[in-house]
Image: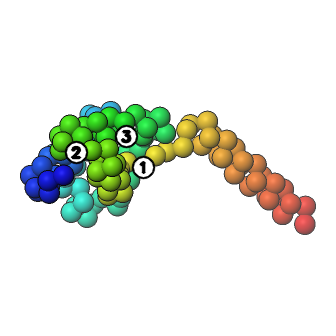
Amino acid sequence: MRPLTNNKKDELIKTLINKQLKPYGLTYDDIKDQDSDIAYHKKWFEQYTMTDQEAIDFRIWALKEIKSMLRCGVAQSQALFSEFWLNWGLRVAPPLAQRKYKLKKINENQENESGCENRL
């Protein structure tokens, strides 16, 4: 594969970020300055999440997009996607049912602990 020019790589990154942020009604231009703003305690890619299924769907779409935009093979597109995901991939949140179950267990543990303290 030909070496990537900064223009092609930048265009690819913007395209992938825009696709990730589409459900939130945001684009790359909306978030590009957030990293330099002190008021933000989390980076933009930590603030927004996607589900496991959304992450899988995004990966499938992104690999096709990378191959198309950069005219590269499967191995190269996977390597580029891995680099993108590591640097700018949204956090994958556990499914709602799993979060509710964990919260329930935490609450039960807290009740059990407080019940023991009251008996002593």
The structure residue drawn at horizontal position 28% and vertical position 36%, both measured from the top left corner, is 64
Residue sitting nearer the eye, 64 or 37: 64
| Mark 3 in CB contact with mark 1 (< 8 angstroms) | no
Q: Mark 3 highlights which residue?
A: 59
| Residue 70 at least partly seen | yes
Question: Alpha carbon of mark 1 to alpha carbon of mark 2: how far?
Answer: 27 Å
The structure residue drawn at horizontal position 33% and vertical position 49%, both measured from the top left corner, is 75
Q: Examine the rendered structure and indicate whether residue 64 appears above or below residue 72.
A: above
Q: Which class describes the residues within 10 Å of circle 3: few (<14), some (14-19), or many (20+)?
A: some
Of pointers 3 and 2, the one earlier in the residue sequence: 3
The structure residue drawn at horizontal position 14% and vertical position 53%, both measured from the top left corner, is 2
Of pointers 3 and 1, the one earlier in the residue sequence: 3
Q: Which class describes the residues within 10 Å of circle 2: few (<14), some (14-19), or many (20+)?
A: some
Q: Examine the rendered structure and indicate whether residue 86 appears above or below residue 70.
A: below
Question: Where residue 46 sits in the image (x, y, percent)?
Answer: 38, 53
Disc ID at residue 91: 1
Of pointers 1 and 2, the one earlier in the residue sequence: 2
Left or right: residue 48 versus residue 99 is left
Where disc 1 sits, the SS reads: strand
Where disc 3 sits, the SS reads: helix
Residue sitting nearer the eye, 4 or 103: 4
Question: Where residue 45 sits in the image (x, y, percent)?
Answer: 34, 51
Nearest-to-viewer mark from 3 and 2: 2
| Mark 1 in CB contact with mark 2 (< 8 angstroms) | no
Disc ID at residue 72: 2
Identity of the amino acid at label 2? Cys
The structure residue drawn at horizontal position 27% and vertical position 44%, both measured from the top left corner, is 73
Residue sitting nearer the eye, 111 or 79: 79
Identity of the amino acid at label 1? Arg
Identity of the amino acid at label 3? Arg
Question: Alpha carbon of mark 3 to alpha carbon of mark 2: how far?
Answer: 16 Å
Question: Alpha carbon of mark 3 to alpha carbon of mark 1: how far?
Answer: 13 Å
